[in-house]
Amino acid sequence: MNMAKKTKKNKEEHLNGEADEAPEAQTPAGEGAAQEAAEPVRDETPLEQAERERDEYLGNWHRARADYQNLKRRTFDDVQGAVGRERTALLQEMLTILDFLDMALATPVEHAEAKNLKTGVQMTRDQLMALLERHRVCVMETEEGAFDHGLHQAVATVETDDVEPGQIVEVMRRGFTIAGEVLRYAQVRVAAETQTGTEADNESGGDTAPGED
């Protein structure tokens, strides 16, 4: 009897002990990380602060230096482009003067004074041409050959049977190049197909074959 009571009492104490033990509170996920993030950041040492500021200053200096180099290069290109355009315009105007001198030299003269004047014009023309050659300006060879859009400017067409269509018939104004590039296009007259040849081609193409209506 006593033994049964004792066993029952031990069971009750064991159950009461388990009931008294409360489960430990669990920290929600992420709350620990938030607490760690909320903790104050460790202050920089004077050496660390100096190194950080040094890196910032060096980075800013490198960026400023790169920007300056880019600006310098763009400015140089712009200046060179402007100088090149002005130089080209000046040389083209000098070519116009050369044309006038050539026209004056082509005029026949008889009097001695006019001949002396013509000699002076020839000397001026030679000096101007020498100046142009020093700047790598050369006369474009366009006396004969096929018309080239990259070198020539067609100002008129001529119907002729002497040369094939598309060939240069006459040079109206000489062209010039500078360092291999076109400075002034040559103005030329180009051969066109004659009307007779065109009509003959049309007639031959329009003939009806024997047996066809």
Image (tube, rainbow, N blue to C red):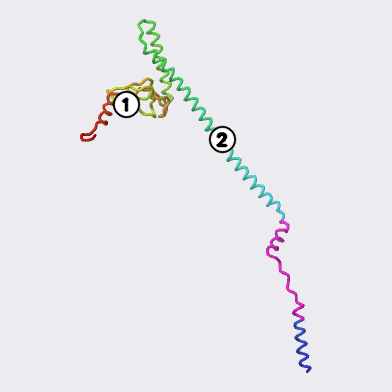
Q: Nearer the viewer, residue 118 or 184?
A: 184
The residue where tag 1 is placed is 167
Placement of the C terminus among the 4 image quadrants: top left
- Asked which quadrant contains residue 19, the reply is bottom right
Instruction: Residue 55: give x, y in percent of width and height.
Output: 64, 48
Q: Residue at x 55, y 33 (%)?
A: 75
**Mark 1: few, some, or many residues within 10 Å (few <14, many ≥20)?**
some
**Mark 1 is on which residue type?**
Gln
Indicate left or right for 1 with 68 as reference.
right
**Is 24 covered by the magenta stretch?**
yes
- Asked which quadrant contains residue 21, the reply is bottom right
Confirm or deny contact between disc 2 and disc 1 (CB under 8 A).
no
Range of magenta residues:
16-41
Vertical placement of 194 versus 116: above or below? below
Q: CA distance from mark 2 to mark 1?
A: 49 Å
Indicate left or right for 21 with 68 as reference.
right
Q: Please identify the residue farthest to the front as the structure is shown.
A: 213
**Mark 2 is on which residue type?**
Lys
**Is 187 covered by the magenta stretch?**
no
Instruction: Residue 105: give x, y in percent of width and height.
Output: 38, 13
Q: Nearer the viewer, residue 168 or 109?
A: 168
- The secondary structure type at the circle numbered 1 is loop
**Mark 2: few, some, or many residues within 10 Å (few <14, many ≥20)?**
few
Q: Residue at x 53, y 31 (%)?
A: 78
- Numbered tag placed on residue 7 in the rendering: none
- Numbered tag placed on residue 72 in the rendering: 2
Instruction: Residue 25: give x, y in percent of width and height.
Output: 73, 70
